[in-house]
Amino acid sequence: MDLHQRGLAPPQAKVPFFGMAEKKRPASAERPARSSADRKSNAGSTPDPWEMCARLEHGGDRSFAWSVREQVIDSAPEDRARIEEQLLKALALPGCTEAGRAFVCQMLALVASIKSVPALATLLKDGKSADDARYAVQQIPGPEAAAALRDALGSLSGAPKAGVIGSIAHRRDTTARAVLAGIRENPSEAPVVREAAARAIAHLS
């Protein structure tokens, strides 16, 4: 059934009172051509997806995150340094949210090199961001990443510290055995931390 049959068709346009249909103006008269400056201005208003990812909120719009995720996953080896740089810039933004930081660290886990270690090492020493950072750091090869994990132990306690110990074990960092043994035997450490240290030592044996 079409719109006329359903009674939903719009009313017929009225003919102007002077009895002649109004002559349609050419498109050029209705909309003046945009200048190159206008086009550049409009193009510049498009949000930067990398910056938007840093401002993610839990339960919010993740369309930009999906776009960035696809770029990261599909990146060729020669493009990963550029992508890593974009992610590090997003991580350093003053408005980076908790959800944004978690997402950026997840993406860094896929492409990060030792260049990312200094920024991630700072996050490792904060109990609020240690879990996000360690998932990225534990994927980075080299002694710099291993050292960042060991160095963070003295700044953490409770579950975040246990998590970093788990990352040390995941990397099979045998140089951490002495530090882990000291944590295991330290009665002032939380039980969850001492247990994590004992498991890590067993894994590294």
Image (cartoon, rainbow, N blue to C red):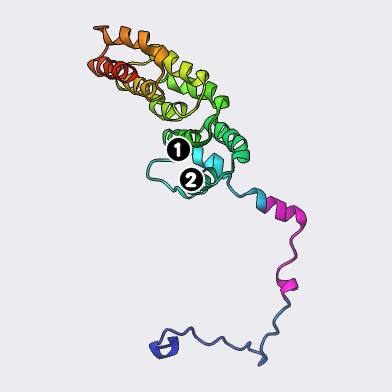
Q: Are marks 2 and 1 in contact (CB under 8 Å)?
A: yes
Residue 155 shows up from this direction: no
Give the percent coordinates (x, y) of residue 3: 44, 86
**Numbered disc total:** 2
Relative depth, front residue between 125 and 59: 125
- Dividing the picture into quadrants, the one containing residue 16 is bottom right
Mark 2, Cα crowd under 10 Å, few <14 / some 14-19 / many 20+, is many
Q: What amino acid is at disc 1?
A: Phe
Q: Residue at x 46, y 19 (%)?
A: 146
Q: Residue at x 71, y 71 (%)?
A: 30
Q: Residue at x 37, y 45 (%)?
A: 59
Q: Which residue is mark 1?
A: 103
**What kind of element bears circle 2?**
helix
Q: Is residue 98 magenta?
A: no
Q: Which residue is mark 2?
A: 65
Q: Earlier in the sequence, mark 2 or mark 1?
A: 2
Relative depth, front residue between 182 and 158: 182
Mark 1, Cα crowd under 10 Å, few <14 / some 14-19 / many 20+, is many
Q: Which residues are magenta?
A: 27-42
